[in-house]
Image (cartoon, grey):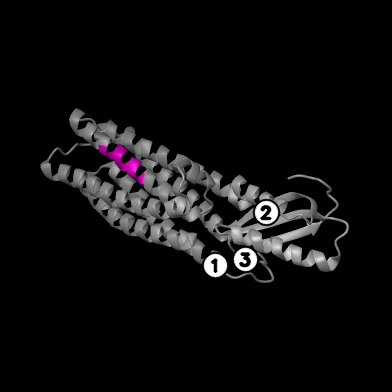
Amino acid sequence: MAREGSKLAIFASMAANLGIAVMKFVAAFFTGSSAMLSEGIHSLVDTANGILLLWGIKRSKIKPDAQHPFGHGKEIYFWSFIVAIFIFALGGGVALYEGIKHLFSTDELQIDHSTKMKVWNYGVLIGSLLFEGASLWVGWKEFRKKQPTGFFTAMAKSKDAATIAVIIENSAAVVGLLIALVGISLTYYFNNPVFDAWASILIGLLLSGVALFMAVETKHLLIGESADVEEINKIVQILKSFPQLEGFGNIKTMHMGPDDILLGANINFKDHLTVAEIEPVVKEIKNKIIENNPRIKYIFIETDSIKNKKN
């Protein structure tokens, strides 16, 4: 199931981020690097985000009830949206603040060129890159089990918001670490802390951009995004295979969760069919659709006089 794969990716990400956050804060304390502090905050926020995503997955498994007849599948989309807000406010916002603050106070900052300080900076950054890279690999491996297509196509088609959030967070973390690495290297080389400040600002902009992308994607899912065109076309082909139908149309789908799709359709039976003959055909249509796509959990078929109408 997509949600079980999501949990594995989230746990791997949380374990990596928690250890990395500790290393970064220790390094920032001893070196005074704003980029390192920003990265530490970023890793801590990512750890907390993992908890929110796990909570969203747990809530999304609550069974349907009278108040929520279609279940709570969309809870994972809501908590993914909250994660995007946290990344923007606590990740991007703090990183931008730290970078701008240090940018206007670079004259007061002293650069420690001692071997000890360089070991702290480069050791933590390189170690973090290894941990984040491993976490990203685990998340991507789980994601590819459900989406074997190319990267951008897979990201666009997937409705597994939790795994997408982990992949995007870890990708941003790797890029952010590379920015911090370049910023610190330039700071040492030119003996100018302005590069460290700009690195923090760039990290803040990166996280803000990631948060905006995640917010837009989850917004579509929260509002109610349809199934993929390929999935809808398969439904059309199944309906066409029934000679008892005079026509069909108004096929509508909506994701109620990563693995829960609602389907509604209007169909028109040939006039000579009786009610007793129609009922088993409707049942067979539903069974074939679910057999072809188990993610379709709810099917509502309504008879209508749509003679020869095509989807």
Q: Give the image location of residue 58, x and y in percent.
A: 50, 66
> Where is residue 294, by image quadrant?
bottom right
Q: How far across and how far down the image is residue 85, in percent? A: 50, 49
Q: Earlier in the sequence, mark 2 or mark 1?
A: 1
Residue at numbered disc 2: 238
Magenta stretch bounds = 173-181
Circle 3 or circle 2, nearest the eye: 2
Q: Can residue 94 be seen in the rendering of this structure? A: yes
168 and 206: which is toward the camera: 168
Where does the C terminus fall, quadrant-wise? top right
Instruction: Label 2, secondary structure: give it.
Output: helix
SS category of the residue bearing label 3: loop
Q: Is residue 24 above or below residue 62?
A: above
At 41% from the left edge and 55% from the top edge, which residue is drawn?
A: 142
Q: Are marks 2 and 1 in contact (CB under 8 Å)?
A: no
Q: Can you tell which mark lies on residue 71?
A: 3
Left or right: residue 157 compared with residue 106: right
